[in-house]
Image (cartoon, rainbow, N blue to C red):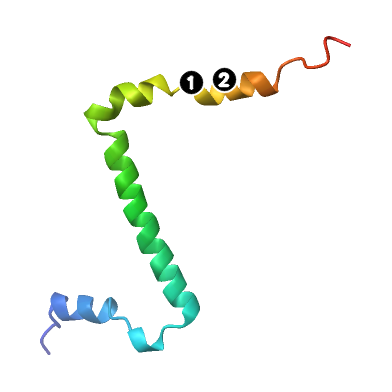
Amino acid sequence: MMPRPIVNSLAEYFHTDWAAMTVSDWVGTIVTVVVFILMVVVYFQVFRPKNRDRLEAQKHIPFEVDNESNGDNDGGK
């Protein structure tokens, strides 16, 4: 008996019955693809050297918001 080619077994493994997919399957597939594309765009923007100065100027924003919300608002009473 000859071993099965790897290409055919991979094609069988990744085969998708598109006609049998439910609405939930389609929503999950679409959400996954959209999130993947958005993450690629975000990574491209973050790691692009051209955007470094703009992002560096905004790196302390979360800490500034925390300091404002944790301040003493009642005048020490």
User: If the image is split into quadrants, where does the N terminus sit?
Assistant: bottom left
| 45 versus 24 height, above or below | above
Query: Is residue 8 shown left or right of residue 55?
Result: left
Query: What type is the residue that disc 2 sits on?
Result: Glu
- Residue at 82 percent of width and 10 percent of height: 75
Residue 74 position in % (x across, y down) = 83, 15
Q: Residues within 10 Å of mark 2 (few under 14, many from 20)?
A: few
**Residue at the right extreme of this rendering:** 77
For the residues labelled 1 and 2, the Cα–Cα distance comes to 6 Å
Question: Toward which corner of the image does residue 67 lie, by quadrant?
Answer: top right
- Total labels: the figure holds 2
- Residue at 14 percent of width and 76 percent of height: 7
Residue under label 2:
64
Residue under label 1:
60
Disc 2, SS? helix
- Tag 1–tag 2 contact (CB < 8 Å): yes
Residue 4 position in % (x across, y down) = 15, 83
- Residue at 29 percent of width and 38 percent of height: 45
Q: Nearer the viewer, residue 75 or 16?
A: 75
User: If the image is split into quadrants, where does the C terminus sit?
Assistant: top right
Disc 1, SS? loop
